[in-house]
Amino acid sequence: MIRAALALFISLTGTQWVEAACRQALALGLDVSGSVDAREYRLQIGGVAEALNDPPVRDALLALPGHHVDLMVYEWSGSSDQRVILPWTPLRDAATLDEAIAQLRTTERRAASPGTALGDAMQFGARQLATRSDCRKHTLDISGDGISNFGPRPRDIRSSLQNQPLGPQGLTINGLVIGTEDAALGDSGQAEVGALAPYYRAEVILGPGAFVEAAEGFEDYARAMTRKLLRELDGRAYAQLPPARDQ
């Protein structure tokens, strides 16, 4: 039964993708617009590092030797304000993953424009993913705590990206929305997430199985990112892949 399933998998995707050394290119885009203060910035960056170091996430990232995940992380705010803080890194072993986590933990915030140009952030992430054409799967992971107020509309960018030729599965865009954590505002943080999640579903996410994860404030960001990565890194479809050929 496994052989039959694998044969079908190969016939549908093509052997060049089954044998690809890079099974997934994953780009994480982090909102550093004016609504994100210094403390929230550290919680967001630290939350990504904590999520990557979570034992089940580490297992998912390193589960298939010979079929690694390529990871990059960037910050975004205004229309022309995006910065790569972790260049494309093939996570082939635990040491490389540890180095990526350490680099994120020591990243310092820079001055950034206050705007929230979500459409431009999506376009930037998609361009970065297009450079990883040898990977089988391409996933863009956008975090944000508000709606777009500068640049092109996210829905227009999403429409332009729908047919981007990235491997057999095309481009997937998932969202992580962040609500407020101000206790003085009572239940409004929950309400904010409740309003922002539908916006991301309508304007941002793209591809079969795309989804929106929610963090109830930046204090909850690490938990939400961990949950999100575990959904994005489901490697069961690759469990029976042959060893990758030496390049």
Image (spheres, rainbow, N blue to C red):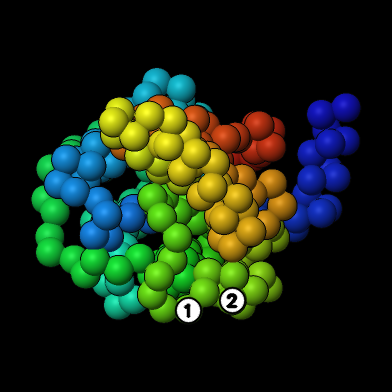
Residue type pointed to by label 1:
Pro
Quadrant of image for the N terminus = top right
Q: Name the residue that disc number 1 marks.
A: 152
Q: Name the residue that disc number 2 marks.
A: 156
Q: Is residue 26 above or below residue 67?
A: below
Left or right: 122, with 164 as reference point? left
Toward the viewer: 92 or 227?
Answer: 227
Q: Is residue 139 above or below residue 232?
A: below
Provide residue 213's location: percent of width, then percent of height: 52, 39
Provide residue 10's location: percent of width, then percent of height: 78, 49
Toward the viewer: 81 or 194?
Answer: 194
Q: Is residue 49 above or below residue 108?
A: above
Quadrant in which residue 231 is drawn: top right
Toward the viewer: 10 or 169?
Answer: 169
Question: Are there few (<14), some (14-19), or many (20+) residues within 10 Å of tag 2?
Answer: few
Residue sitting at the far top: 55
Residue type pointed to by label 2:
Asp
Secondary structure beneath disc 2? helix
Left or right: 100, with 214 as reference point? left
